[in-house]
Image (cartoon, rainbow, N blue to C red):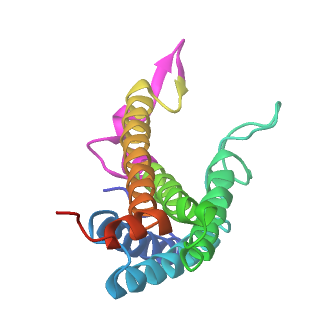
């Protein structure tokens, strides 16, 4: 494991990410709308705020989005923008959680939180390839004598992550649609009508 270069900020960021990974995973699979779900959702939000805010202070390596700027340290690039989007989706999902009686927010909450967790898993994939000795040789491809990041293996891992979360997003949206359909005033009125003999 390659961890000698992690700073104090990096360790706190890592602790926040691990907490968010655990709380997020539990909320993905557990029953929704329960007090435990709400508690884990709040804990996930706090963990993400800590982890992602500290991530904005870490400049060891990034991939620039501006031509002519080389990838490396002291760059606000792709990974930092993913952090900004993760913060945005986390806060949007948390804001939407208490407003789910309206259709837009009912879909916004699971979609935003799922996208937030997807970005967290994307960061985990990159860190695993950067830090785990068994995976490090596969983080880059050597093309024409130059190291190219990300490698085709890293890209394939991210594509698998994207497909998994696309399926999760679809399932959550269908679940919300079915719940809203079954609890609509028309559906409730139809259930309350006594059966005719």
* Viewer-nearest residue: 83 or 102: 102
With 79 as the anchor, is 33 left or right in this view? left
Residue under the image location 45 percent in, 76 percent down: 44
Query: Which residue reaches farthest front?
Result: 197
Report how many numbered discs are placed on residues in the image: 0
Q: Residue furthest top?
A: 144
Image position, residue 62 (x, y; %): 64, 47
Compare residues 184 and 73 and report the one nearer the observer.
Answer: 184
Answer above or below: position of 126 versus 32.
Answer: above
Task: Give x and y (percent) for residue 177.
Answer: 45, 54
Say left or right for 108 vs 27: right
Quarter assignment of residue 153: top left
Q: To which quarter of the image does residue 24 belong?
A: bottom left
Q: Classify the position of the N terminus by image quarter.
A: bottom left
| Residue 109, magenta (yes or no) | no
Residue furthest left in the image = 197
Determine if residue 71 is in view.
yes
- The x, y position of residue 71, in whole percent, is 68, 39
Q: Tell me if I can see residue 5 in this picture.
A: no
Q: Residue at x 65, y 56 (%)?
A: 85
Residue 186 percent across, percent down from the top left: 47, 63
Q: Identify the residue at horizontal 36%, vertical 79% (top origin).
A: 37
Q: In this view, does 44 lie above or below 107?
A: below
Q: Please give the range of residues in magenta.
A: 125-146
Which quadrant: the C terminus?
bottom left
Residue 144 included in the magenta stretch of the image: yes
Could you tell whether 49 is left or right of 137 in the image?
right
Closer-to-camera residue (78/148):
78
């Amino acid at each position: 494991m390659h961890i000698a270069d992690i700073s104090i900020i990096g360790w706190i960021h890592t602790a926040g990410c691990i907490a968010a990974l655990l709380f997020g995973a539990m909320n993905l699979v557990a029953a929704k709308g329960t007090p435990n779900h709400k508690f884990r959702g709040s804990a996930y939000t706090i963990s993400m705020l800590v982890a992602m805010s500290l991530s904005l202070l870490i400049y060891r390596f990034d991939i620039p989005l501006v031509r002519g700027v080389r990838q490396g340290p002291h760059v606000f690039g792709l990974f930092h923008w993913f952090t900004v989007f993760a913060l945005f989706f986390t806060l949007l999902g948390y804001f939407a959680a208490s407003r789910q009686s309206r259709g837009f927010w009912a879909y916004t909450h699971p979609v935003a939180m799922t996208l937030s967790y997807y970005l967290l898993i994307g960061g985990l994939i990159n860190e695993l390839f950067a830090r785990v000795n068994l995976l490090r040789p596969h983080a880059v491809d050597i093309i024409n004598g130059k190291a190219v990041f990300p490698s085709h293996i890293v890209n394939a891992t991210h594509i698998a992550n994207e497909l998994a979360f696309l399926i999760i997003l679809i399932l959550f949206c269908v679940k919300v649609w079915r719940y809203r359909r079954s609890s609509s005033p028309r559906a409730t009125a139809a259930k309350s009508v006594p059966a005719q003999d």
